[in-house]
């Protein structure tokens, strides 16, 4: 049972599950929009309520459980910088060399 709990508490599983649930709810919005405007308005209300329930019943408790173990999930992305040579924009802010072209990076001020 402990192995199953560890599998469920991995960040990847929860993120994929929440993404799938949001995608399925969003597909209901698209279907309602293409069918009828009156059903589209009710689908928007359903979508907002559904996403709020997912957030408060799944995401928020999961963030608290992971915070107790010292992990940050669903937080702000780490700061990045752009390489002046190859213009790749996904380098970590503390990088000293570009991972794509190998040029030295200026120090962060």
Image (tube, rainbow, N blue to C red):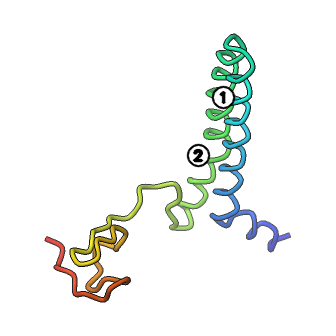
Q: Residues within 10 Å of mark 2 (few under 14, many from 20)?
A: few
Give the quadrant of the C terminus: bottom left
Residue 55, compared with residue 29, is above or below; it is below
The quadrant holding residue 38 is top right
The residue most toward the left is 109
Q: Position of residue 82 (x, y in %)?
A: 27, 69
Q: Nearer the viewer, mark 2 or mark 1?
A: 1
Please provide percent x and percent y for residue 92: 34, 73
Kindly report the distance in space between the C-alpha atoms of the residues bearing marks 2 and 1: 18 Å
Q: Secondary structure at mark 2?
A: helix
Per the image, label 1 sits on a secondary structure element best described as helix
Contact? badges 2 and 1 (CB < 8 Å)? no
Q: Nearer the viewer, residue 5 or 15?
A: 15
Q: Quadrant of residue 87?
A: bottom left
Report x, y in % for residue 69: 56, 67
Does 58 appear above or below 11?
above
Residue that carries the numbered disc 2 in the rendered image: 60
Q: Which quadrant: the N terminus?
A: bottom right
* Vertical order, 33 against 106 (above or below): above
Is 54 placed left or right of 95 in the picture? right
Q: Which mark is residue 91?
A: none
Residue in view at x 46 percent, y 55 percent: 75
Q: Compare marks 2 and 1 and give the one earlier in the sequence.
A: 1
* Rendered image: mark on residue 47: 1
Q: Is residue 86 left or right of residue 45?
A: left
Relative image position of residue 97 (x, y in whole percent):
28, 86
- Seen from the viewer's position, the closer of residues 48 and 29 is 29
Q: Is the residue 62 above or below the residue 93 in the image? A: above
What is the tally of numbered marks visible in this picture?
Answer: 2
Residue located at (37% from left, 84% from top): 99
């Amino acid at each position: 049972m402990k192995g199953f709990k560890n599998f469920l508490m991995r960040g990847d599983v929860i993120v994929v599950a929440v993404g799938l649930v949001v995608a399925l709810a969003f597909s209901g919005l698209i279907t309602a929009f293409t069918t009828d405007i009156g059903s589209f308005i009710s689908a928007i209300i359903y979508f907002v309520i559904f996403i709020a329930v997912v957030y408060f019943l799944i995401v928020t408790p999961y963030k608290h459980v992971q915070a107790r173990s010292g992990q940050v999930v669903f937080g702000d992305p780490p700061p990045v910088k752009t390489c002046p040579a190859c213009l790749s924009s996904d380098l970590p802010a503390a990088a000293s060399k570009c991972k794509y072209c190998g040029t030295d990076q200026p120090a962060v001020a």
